[in-house]
Image (spheres, rainbow, N blue to C red):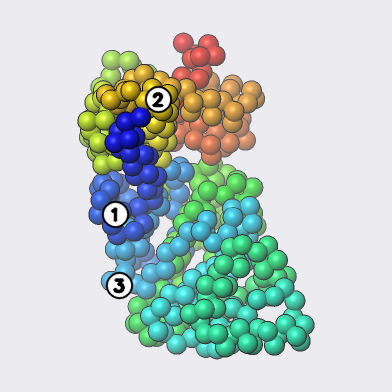
């Protein structure tokens, strides 16, 4: 096997996995200036807001929200004490509740304060970090006191790990704060107040990956528990999936809490609405080039045919994560081919490799769609809107990236390009 060529595709596969860009060296190596106007708008809204304003950032999964929010957090640091974290790094999505989100906020604030030697009251530390057991028997209280004596540098990682890994730990948080969630909010507020007193900067918390939750959980958080979730007395940026903005009750709950409208991260358009069904239409060159530059930073140009790279970009539908999925699938196929044919020395990503990659991704979509959602897909494809589409079906398609939302003067929708191929395969569209 050509080990040098294999190593190139292995590295490209790893580099394509670097989303979102979090670490400084990743940002330096791979960042492309993408959707700068969205970041500027969010920054201006936060800077102009009152101290306890909440913000909701919406967009398709994989469109680039996480990378942009990390960049936003970095740019806000000179004027704010910023705490950025992903809820997915702290707890599995199925276990997320409004109470453990508030606990996570308090825990991350305490961790950030500790790193900067900001004094926090002992009773707050003990109440947040003394959960080393699941009951409050006297013997266990003694254990808690001895653990508190370990020092914050050891207790914080222990508490964070238990929060991540132990259902019993999370159950205890739920039990204790079931009727006393205001106490938990009060602890977060006291930590924030201590930070602001010491640093002379307002606190800003940015919570990523709430948009990756199942729709049922999203509705529970933003519909049934919105008041308590928005009750901390400092600025917080939350994320929601674009599909949640299609739910009138969720939007009504957000409006009632002062969210005039969510900040939106729109999908990039390769074609104007009037051109998207014209096979002779030229793609928007600036957008295509931006996506090509993202690809070029991760796959060496001499290992991919230029026209194939362009096809990969257009098949992404303007969703950055979909470009990544296509790229990784192509790299995987190249690695497989190198093992099946060890004598190959000229392998690169070409149309043949892309065809196999798209087939695999098309089958992934087919498994999600089943049979009941195809009529809704055809309706969206034919009308470019959702007006005559069953609302539940449409929300599922939007949440699963099978349908994408685009913006001009008005909203419009289209079927993911790979799913369009699936509709053609099934002879559901011409």
Dot 2 or dot 1: first in sequence order is 1
Left of 233 or right of it: where is 369?
right
**Residue 50: percent from left, percent from top:** 40, 70
**Residue 164: percent from left, percent from top:** 58, 63
Element at label 1: helix
Q: Are marks 3 and 2 in contact (CB under 8 Å)?
A: no
Q: Are marks 2 and 1 in contact (CB under 8 Å)?
A: no
Q: Which residue is mark 1?
A: 27
Q: CA distance from mark 3 to mark 2?
A: 52 Å
Q: Residue at x 45, y 87 (%)?
A: 119
Left of 430 or right of it: where is 140?
right
Q: Which residue is mark 2?
A: 337
Q: CA distance from mark 3 to mark 1?
A: 21 Å
Front residue of 241/272: it is 241
Q: Which residue is mark 3?
A: 79
Image depth: mark 2 or mark 1 in front: 2
Left of 288 or right of it: where is 356?
right
Image depth: mark 3 or mark 1 in front: 1
Dot 3 or dot 1: first in sequence order is 1
From this viewpoint, which residue is outermost toward the right? 137
């Amino acid at each position: 096997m050509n080990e040098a060529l294999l190593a190139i595709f292995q590295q490209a596969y790893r580099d394509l996995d670097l989303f979102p860009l979090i670490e400084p060296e990743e940002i330096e190596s791979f960042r492309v200036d993408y959707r700068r106007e969205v970041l500027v708008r969010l920054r201006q809204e936060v800077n102009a807001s009152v101290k306890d304003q909440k913000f909701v950032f919406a967009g398709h999964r994989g469109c680039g929200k996480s990378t942009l929010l990390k960049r936003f957090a970095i740019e806000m640091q000179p004027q704010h004490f910023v705490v950025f974290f992903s809820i997915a790094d702290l707890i599995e999505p199925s276990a997320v509740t409004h109470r453990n989100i508030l606990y996570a906020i308090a825990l991350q604030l305490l961790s950030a304060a500790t790193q900067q030697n900001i004094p926090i009251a002992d009773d707050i530390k003990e109440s947040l970090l003394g959960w080393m057991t699941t009951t409050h028997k006297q013997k266990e209280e003694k254990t808690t006191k001895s653990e508190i004596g370990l020092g914050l540098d050891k207790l914080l990682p222990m508490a964070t790990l238990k929060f991540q890994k132990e259902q019993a730990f999370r159950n205890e948080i739920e039990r204790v704060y079931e009727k006393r969630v205001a106490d938990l909010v009060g602890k977060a507020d006291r930590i924030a107040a201590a930070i602001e007193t010491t640093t002379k900067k307002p606190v800003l918390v940015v919570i990523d990956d709430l948009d990756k939750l199942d729709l049922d959980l999203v509705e529970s958080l933003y519909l049934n528990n919105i008041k308590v979730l928005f009750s901390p007395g400092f600025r917080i940026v939350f994320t929601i999936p674009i599909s949640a903005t299609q739910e009138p009750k969720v939007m009504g709950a957000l409006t009632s809490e002062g969210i005039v409208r969510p900040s939106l991260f729109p999908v990039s358009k390769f074609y104007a609405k009037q051109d998207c069904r014209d096979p002779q239409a030229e793609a928007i060159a600036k957008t295509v080039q931006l996506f090509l530059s993202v690809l070029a930073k991760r796959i060496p140009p001499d290992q991919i045919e230029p026209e194939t790279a362009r096809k990969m970009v257009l098949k992404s539908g303007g969703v950055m994560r979909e470009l990544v999925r296509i790229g990784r699938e192509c790299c995987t196929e190249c690695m497989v081919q190198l093992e099946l044919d060890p004598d190959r020395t000229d392998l690169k990503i070409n149309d043949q490799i892309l065809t196999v990659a798209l087939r695999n991704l098309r089958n992934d979509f087919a498994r999600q769609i089943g049979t009941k959602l195809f009529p809704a897909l055809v309706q969206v494809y034919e009308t470019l809107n959702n007006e005559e589409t069953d609302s539940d079906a449409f929300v599922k398609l939007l949440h699963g990236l099978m349908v994408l939302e685009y913006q001009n003067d008005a909203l419009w929708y289209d079927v993911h390009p790979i799913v369009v191929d699936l509709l053609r395969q099934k002879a559901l569209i011409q």
